[in-house]
Image (tube, helix red, strand yellow):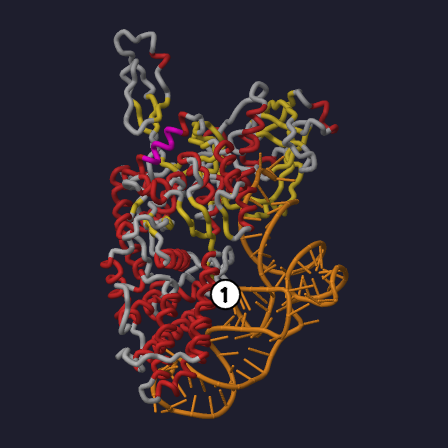
Amino acid sequence: MLDTRYDHKNLEEKIYKLWEKSGFFNPDKLLNKKAKPFTIIMPPPNANGALHMGHAVGMTLQDIMVRWNRMRGKKTLWLPGADHAGFETQVVFDKKLEKESRDRRTIPRDELYREIWNFTQKNKEIMYAQTKKLGASCDWSRETFTLDPRIIDIVYGTFEKLYKDGLVYRDLKVVNWCPKHKTALSDLEVKYAERTDPLYYIKYGPLTLATVRPETKFGDTALAVNPKDRRYKNFIGKTIEARGVLGSLKFRVIADAAVDPKFGTGVIKVTPAHDAADFEIWARHKDEIAGPKAVIDENGRLNENTGEFKGLKVAEARGAVAAKMKEIGILEKMEPNYVHQVATCYKCGSTLEPLPKPQWFVKMKPLAEPAIKALKAKKFQILPKRSEKVYLHWLKNIRDWNISRQITWGIRIPAWFHEPKCIPKIGHEKDVIKCKEIIVSPKEPKCEFCDAKYVQDPDVFDTWFSSGQWPYATLQIRGSDFKNFYPTDVMETGYDILFFWVARMVMLGIYRTGKSPFKTVYLHGLVRDKDRQKMSKSRGNVVDPLGVADLYGTDAVRMALTVGNTAGNDIVISEDKIRGYRNFATKIWNIARFVMMNEVKSGTKPKFTASDRKNLANLKKIKAQITKHLERFEFHLAAEKIYHYIWHEFADKIIEAAKPRLKSENNPDKAAAYKTIETLLTESIKMLHPFMPYVTEEIYQNLPNRSKETLMIENW
RNA sequence: GGGCGUUUAGCUCAGUGGUAGAGCGCUGUCCUCACACGACAGAGGCCGCUGGUUCGAUUCCAGCAACGCCCACCA
């Protein structure tokens, strides 16, 4: 006889092992080879820490879909993995180094790489153990790390193809430079913050202009006005003489439509080295004005082009330069409270320094077009539906993607630069002009014409460039998986990475395979604490999903994360809610206990009453409703309905009504009462299994007559 | 400057063109032999505001307000 309490602590591990041993996590074990596939590629968690509640939400929803489809007889593959998470992991590891008073830039590359490798492998194992504890029924035989050599091969192949197709190029642009992390970032990794700064009005000879960044004036190469601005019509094309902080200067006044006549005085200074917009203005007027002249270095300090200000940090230099301007009488006025948006690093919040740097860029328009078409042609859908508009808007306005990162951790870019010295091979003295400056190749190239070495680009890819290829890459590295499981059915992930990851998977997936990598994208919300705060390590409000699972059982945590959780909306988690579903686990456990206690051994032929038949028919109706909810990705409604049915219909009404009949002597009526609740129990735990797999499986294992090895493979 | 979301019971959230739901909390009675992590009974909501459509709106439409989020090279 079962105990009065379901003992999750001692049973969960045992049950998971039972599932693993059964082999049914692997779709190849399925006997029906003609079964339709159902595939989910698990978003690989970053191997730089433990799983958090957000992961638990994703794992739960994915496992619900996977278990349900497996029970429906589909050839179900859920492929797990882990992400090396380039920049994110580098940041975590840099902090660790900082605590040990070490600096990544002074550690030999190979050594540092090995250290971080070991760090991620350790984290990976912890994460996998946590994933198992959450009950995830994924196929561990296909587990893949994003730095698997076979994956890197595919990523390199994509880069080479993009290069050949002219969709990847190296160019000098003003990029988002984080002076703390000392790397460029993509536009998506920029977080704009509102700041209140002084707006300085500075005299440039006869003209006055407004700027918040007087410290960059040493890099000015021109002044610009709007071509339609009548006030300055006579200045266009002229050169004006101005008194500068370091002596007198001459600037040409150019006309460019990008200048807003309503801002400040309608005149701006053009500083191509330290402002992306100015850089583009220069690009349009290359023959008229000088190009980027850097005055700020990678550490965010003024360089040798700034005279006495050399070595000052940008923030310090600003006031110092302004003071000097005031002293020499070129500071006309200052508005102290100018509110504007400043680009900051999404990780550390440092003000980003726009710096001119040669980087690798992906040309996005040609990749975005098919991704837009695919959605419009309903090749895939995004839930919630409203995020489709967000997706389309982003793709329509997409800009080229900087995929170079100046860090160690990641997949090194397979590009090689020709050494400066060029000693021709004998007989090729005239050919050396044909030596290629850059060669894209996974292996070190040799020059045909000279003995120069090629040196590999020290930079690594933006992680999202490789994880953007995850669905097809993970399937292409193994036998006939690609043929059997691609395109996948569902991509389940958080809405916060719609652009970072989902859109890029669609673009790269279509580019390499011709097909969208998935049919449905389901975006879940962010998990918040009871005060609606976003959970984060820096806030210190993270609830460890494994900790509460230890307390109340994984099933309770999963159920609490499912009920009330709708696509695209944030979810608030509280211990009270989890405790409530722990009570539900106990309830279903005791229902099972009651049914088993009242077992009527077969022998007496049951005589079903009208209400027995009604109850059995009603169950089918409920099940059809649950099925419909699951088909529509309404996990919250399905979970709530099952909960309500089991507790308030099955237990409260049907079982209560059956009690007197079960107390009578052995007869056809008693047999019918038993048979009815036995059937309802079996069906209930089947319906509940995708949501609360452990307790239902344990009940199933104790059932007097079960037909399958595990509940996991019962027929839905 | 664009776009989006939310506003329903004390709290956190589901839901619906026609008597309003869940978890936790609250009140009362029961330690009745499945379950006190329980049973039964109950209190508690002008379903943000204003207009419109409709026989009828919390649900559809428009406007407004509050809170929140995303996107954006106005220096």
- Position of residue A568 in the picture relative to residue A421 (left or right): right
Instruction: Using the rendered image of the protein, determine whether residue A647 is visible from the camera's viewpoint.
Output: yes
Q: Is residue A19 left or right of residue A386?
A: left
Residue A710 shown left or right of residue A617 in the figure: left
Question: Is A284 one of the magenta-colored residues?
Answer: no
* Location of residue A506 with respect to A663 vertically, above or below: above
Q: How dense is the environment of label 1, judged by Cα within 10 Å: few (below 14), some, or many (20 and up)? A: few
| Residue at the disc numbered 1 | A531
Report the front residue among A330 and A101: A101
Q: Position of residue B31 (x, y in %)?
A: 38, 91
Give the main secondary structure of the magenta stretch: helix
* Residue drawn at x 48%, y 50% as measured from the top left: A496
What residue is rendered at 69% in x and 26% in y?
A: A227
Residue shown at 46%/49% (left/top)?
A521
Magenta region: which residues?
A154-161
Residue at 57 percent across and 48 percent down: it is: A194
**Residue A269 picture location, percent across and down:** 60, 31
Is the residue A427 above or below the residue A78 in the image? above
Q: Position of residue A384 (x, y in %)?
A: 52, 53
Percent position of residue A619, x then y? 44, 70
Q: Which quarter of the rendered picture does the C terminus of chain A lie within?
A: bottom left
Chain label for disc 1: A
Instruction: Say what secondary structure mark 1 lies in.
Output: loop
Q: Quadrant of the N terminus of chain A?
A: bottom left
